[in-house]
Image: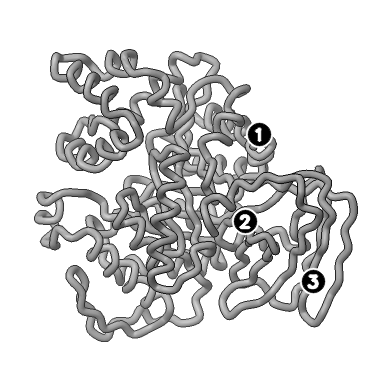
Amino acid sequence: MSGSSHRTHGSSASYADISARHATDNHFIKVTSGYQLGRDGADPNIIISISLANGTIDLLPDPNILLRLPPVTRRNLKTESFTTRRTGGFTSLTASLSCATLAVVIVGVGLDASLQLSFSELRRAAQEAERLGFESLWTPGSGVPDPFHVCAAWAEDTSLRTGISVVPAARMWTPVALAIQAATLGQLSSGRFVLGLGTGGYGQKFWESLGLPNRPIAVMRDYVTTVRQLLSGDTVTYDGPAIRLDGVSIGVHDLPPIPIYLAAIGPQMLKLSGECADGTLLNWATPTRIAESRALIAEGAQRVGRDPSAHVISMYIHVCIDSDALRARRALGVQVLRYAMGHDDDPAVARNRGQLYRGLFAQMGFEDVLSELEDRRDRGASTGELIDAAPDELFQAVGYFGTAAEAPSAYARLSAGLDEAVVRIVTVRRGLEPVIEAMEALTPTRVNAAV
């Protein structure tokens, strides 16, 4: 699927033909104009019925079908009439459209340790997310509570997909340990788990500290390849630059499909993700950057004969919603500048982030802004002073701060080009209440109404 197909406008279309077909490992709903919805593990003989409510077509009868599989674009269709027919094991629908078809982004929620929620509060937040219509729950890949335990609890408490974005694979894990954890979650959740992998750091010193070559593309190719083989039930023998396995198995077969997403920012990692991963996890990207990333992912997929339209592009979008817009701006500003300027309490973390994200923000048009802020920092300016000096455009290019009323339209703008946009919540106040308020402001219904 090309980048342009995710936002398609045009009232000239007179119909859309949506049909179900079964593949070896996926169940797809395919629209003739090229949009598709993945349905992993769905019964090939299930009768897919169509419900028209508020102008939205949903697939029934099992609502979990929408949640089990990789999120892909859905469409709002205002219909004048529709007919269905069943042939063999398949049901198809033909709908006459009275307006343009518009892309609908899948909306998830991201919760992390900075919110200072207890384990029980994280569980309650997940239940609220499901009640409000969110379709996935995500947590970062390190810290306390352990992200695999968090996802396990979420899988028990809700019917939503859960995901880790991202596990710092090279820094903390072996492929075998990762595969065992992911397999366990795949079993517990009946396949509603996504494993996001990243390097966990950057630069020569980082790789030297791990005893690995400073070849991040090769390292992550090794991780994605071996973890996927282990999750497939294979006995793996592998000899790569970073990983060597000799007849290793995790001892289980017939696991539910466990998608592997790769964190990627630079062009070579984006191409690698297209080559070998099921999805890509972007970060701090503008809509223009998202489109550029999609093209590179497609290039990588096509290079090895994979279908780019089956690849999911997901990203955290940081938001701070509060009635005090100034405090919200400062809270979001802390998050943005930690990455854009490599600012962190830990100098090593700051240095690693700065090597990658400083370049990303510069490429997105903020070189002059960041150079001026760095001059201020070198003259002794505090983080608060730097945030106050930064232009709103820097923060609004990659996130949202402000009141609830304007949040959906801003979020819809920032999510352009994504298959799944994850609301990464930043709060001014501690506790569960502001987290729920942020979710209430950015429900999928509100966001997609603003598309």
Mark 2 vs mark 3, foreground winner is 3
Identify the residue at image location x=66%, y=34%.
450
SS state under label 1: loop
Q: Amino acid at mark 2?
A: Ser
Number of numbered markers: 3
Q: Sequence order check: which comes first, mark 1 or mark 3?
A: 3
Q: Position of 267 compared to 218: left or right?
A: right
Task: Residue 178: give its label.
Answer: none
Identify the residue at image location x=17%, y=70%.
241
Say if 306 sits above or below 165 in the image.
below
Q: Sequence order check: which comes first, mark 2 or mark 3?
A: 3
Residue corresponding to mark 2: 159
Residue corresponding to mark 3: 91
Residue 11's image quarter? Answer: top right
Q: CA distance from mark 2 to mark 1?
A: 26 Å
Identify the residue at image location x=86%, y=71%.
85
The coloring applied to the image is one colour
Where is residue 9 shown, x and y percent of the image? 67, 44
Task: Residue 450: give its label.
Answer: 1
Labels 1 & 3 near each other (Cβ < 8 A): no
Q: Residues within 10 Å of mark 2 (few under 14, many from 20)?
A: some
Q: Position of 71 compared to 96: left or right?
A: left
